[in-house]
Image (cartoon, rainbow, N blue to C red):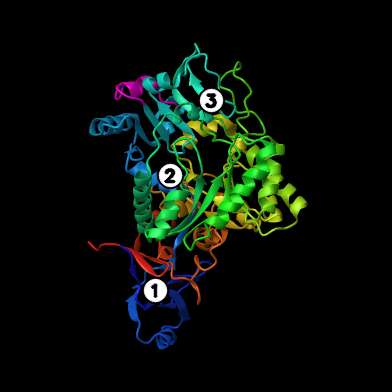
């Protein structure tokens, strides 16, 4: 239960103001606003009746804003068959079996399985049948780009050896063409249309579950990266609107309207007009929709990320495949021009180098057609960026939306990615350091439930380029960020991207979105940053989380 923060002076600890560190600066809050910063005597003099909170050397910083997350669906997943904690294939199957035994639901639905736990990243229907064969099962992987289904689900959907692949996806098949149980990208729709969607009560409960968890991590706002019809996900606007109206929404959230991948160029004007109308209808204090999500490609692990050159082939007979581009470039460009002209911010998903180039080309065309608008366009993920594109972000005013937790040699990178792209392109991975040095604007997010929403885990990888708590070879250490830059991206950078200028910073007049960390991470060894926790989270002047002392 959120409670108002009393008038307070925070003192005796370092303060990160969203841009830089101050070694010992007091911060005064009155009526939910920062009203004074500076020497403790001066701040106390301005709020003489305020309570005093001794930071005792702990860091005070702005609340985190997650610039790319699927919070509501992640919350629903946590309340369903959640596979994110499984360490291998056996544990994944055990978790599914336990969930199936405990529920009488018509479908077994959940998410969170890890591709690297299975051969070639593709689990089979026969393995799933061994633990649930009495009803259909539909289980999304961590990144929601693949679904694992059992034989009952394949039969129900009528998927067999003669079923063609959709234009935006692929059915994993045996040598005889029969489906083996993994559906990539748009092929998920072949089954997901039969899956019962969570009802409003389940979605509402999922939102509250997610919000509580995110507040415990110091997250006070986010951008919900897909709001619209997407495989395994229902439109979320109704639930967020209801939560704001009821007062249950204590976070500051921007929704990104989903641009359908089957968009016809002749429908662009009508679709964009609908987005613009939704921006007006959702212009609330805590929930609004002024962003548009455009998924340009897929992911490298299942070879659906769009590449300028073919993936490495397993054998000479394998096709020269460059992945999937979900939009014809002309349609993509026209959609971006229309969104930009309508005053909407564009949130691109682009992972392969060809997808990054396509997104930048579309923004460049919009800049030519519309001039320099106020659009805060950004590209999320940016796994592979050609060196020739690095300088275009600052030239075009495109923000780098980093999911930094992935920028390391984790299991997926080692077992699935390197063999798919080869050594030369491996050097293009997550070039955050080069982008920062170019002067590009930076924001940061988690992509939860794809990966943990813990900001300090992502910051740790951004700084060290190794998985939290592991001792492995860093991934391109020259592309690391310093702690100040990484923390600024996750606070002021992401808040600016969300058009929330009164949060993400600590300065007079700003809303009291504040976090007390359990330590001063600037005084810690860099490889221990991921251990940082939040002791207190304040969102818009309300205490929304306080850690229980042992």
Work out which quarter of the rendered image holds the C terminus and state it.
bottom left
Work out which residue is located at the far top of the displayed protein and give it.
176
Q: Are marks 1 and 2 in contact (CB under 8 Å)?
A: no
Work out which quarter of the rendered image holds the N terminus and state it.
bottom left
**Residue 100 screen position, x and y as percent:** 27, 30
**Residue 222 screen position, x and y as percent:** 47, 55
Question: Depth check: 527 or 231 in front?
Answer: 231
Q: Residue at x 41, y 77 (%)?
A: 31
**Residue 213 screen position, x and y as percent:** 35, 53
Can residue 218 be seen from the camera position used here? no
Q: Are marks 3 and 1 in contact (CB under 8 Å)?
A: no
Can residue 238 be seen from the camera position used here? yes
Q: Name the residue that disc number 2 marks.
A: 451
**201 left or right of 190?**
left
Q: Name the residue that disc number 1 marks.
A: 13
Query: In whole angstroms, how far apart are the C-alphas of marks 2 and 3?
Result: 24 Å
Q: Residue at x 50, y 38 (%)?
A: 230
**Residue 497 screen position, x and y as percent:** 57, 58
**What is the span of residues highlighted in magenta in the rendered image?**
122-136
**Mark 1 residue element:** loop
- Point out the tag, 2 or 3, that comes first from the N-terminus: 3
Q: Name the residue that disc number 3 marks.
A: 170
């Amino acid at each position: 239960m959120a409670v108002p923060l009393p008038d307070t002076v925070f003192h005796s600890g370092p303060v990160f103001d969203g841009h830089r560190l101050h070694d010992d600066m007091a911060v005064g809050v009155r009526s939910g606003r920062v009203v004074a910063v500076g020497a403790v005597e001066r701040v106390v003099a301005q709020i003489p009746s305020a309570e005093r909170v001794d930071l005792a050397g702990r860091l005070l910083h702005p609340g985190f804003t997650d610039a790319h997350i699927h919070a509501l669906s992640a919350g629903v997943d946590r309340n369903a068959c959640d596979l994110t904690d499984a360490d291998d294939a056996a544990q994944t199957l055990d978790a599914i079996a336990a969930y199936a035994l405990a529920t009488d639901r018509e479908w077994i639905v959940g998410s969170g399985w890890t591709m690297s736990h299975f051969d070639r990243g593709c689990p089979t229907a026969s393995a799933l049948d061994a633990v649930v064969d009495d009803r259909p099962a539909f289980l999304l992987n961590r990144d929601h780009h693949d679904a694992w289904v059992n034989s009952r689900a394949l039969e129900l959907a009528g998927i067999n050896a003669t079923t063609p692949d959709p234009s935006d996806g692929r059915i994993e098949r045996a040598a005889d063409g029969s489906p083996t149980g993994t559906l990539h990208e748009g092929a998920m729709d072949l089954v997901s249309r039969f899956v019962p969607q969570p009802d409003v009560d389940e979605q509402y409960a999922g939102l509250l579950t997610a919000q509580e968890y995110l507040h415990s991590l110091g997250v006070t706002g986010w951008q919900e990266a897909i709001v619209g019809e997407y495989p395994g996900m229902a439109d979320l606007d109704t639930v967020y609107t209801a939560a704001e109206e009821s007062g249950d929404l204590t976070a500051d959230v921007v929704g990104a309207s989903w641009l359908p991948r089957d968009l016809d160029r002749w429908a662009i004007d009508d679709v964009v007009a609908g987005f613009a109308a939704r921006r007006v209808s959702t212009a609330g204090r805590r929930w609004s929709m002024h962003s548009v999500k455009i998924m340009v490609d897929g992911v490298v692990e299942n070879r659906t990320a769009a590449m300028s050159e073919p993936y490495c082939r397993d054998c000479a007979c394998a096709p020269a495949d460059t992945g999937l581009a979900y939009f014809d470039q002309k349609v993509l460009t026209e959609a971006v021009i229309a969104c930009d002209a309508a005053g909407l911010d564009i949130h691109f998903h682009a992972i392969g180098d060809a997808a990054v180039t396509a997104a930048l080309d579309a923004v460049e065309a919009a800049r030519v057609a519309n001039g320099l608008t106020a659009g805060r366009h950004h590209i999320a993920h940016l796994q592979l960026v050609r060196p020739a594109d690095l300088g275009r972000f600052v030239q075009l005013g495109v923000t780098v939306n980093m999911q930094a937790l992935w920028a390391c040699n984790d299991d997926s990178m080692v077992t699935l990615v390197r063999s798919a792209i080869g050594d030369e392109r491996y050097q293009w991975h997550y070039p955050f350091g080069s982008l920062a040095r170019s002067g590009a604007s930076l924001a940061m997010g988690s992509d939860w439930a794809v990966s943990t929403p813990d900001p300090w885990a992502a910051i740790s990888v951004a700084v060290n380029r190794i998985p939290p708590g592991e001792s492995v070879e860093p991934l391109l250490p020259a592309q690391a960020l310093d702690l100040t830059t990484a923390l600024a991206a996750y606070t002021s950078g992401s808040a600016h991207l969300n058009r929330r200028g009164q949060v993400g910073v600590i300065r007079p007049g700003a809303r009291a979105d504040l976090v007390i960390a359990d330590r001063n991470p600037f005084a810690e060894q860099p490889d221990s940053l991921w251990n940082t926790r939040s002791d207190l989270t304040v969102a818009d002047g309300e205490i929304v989380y306080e850690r229980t002392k042992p």
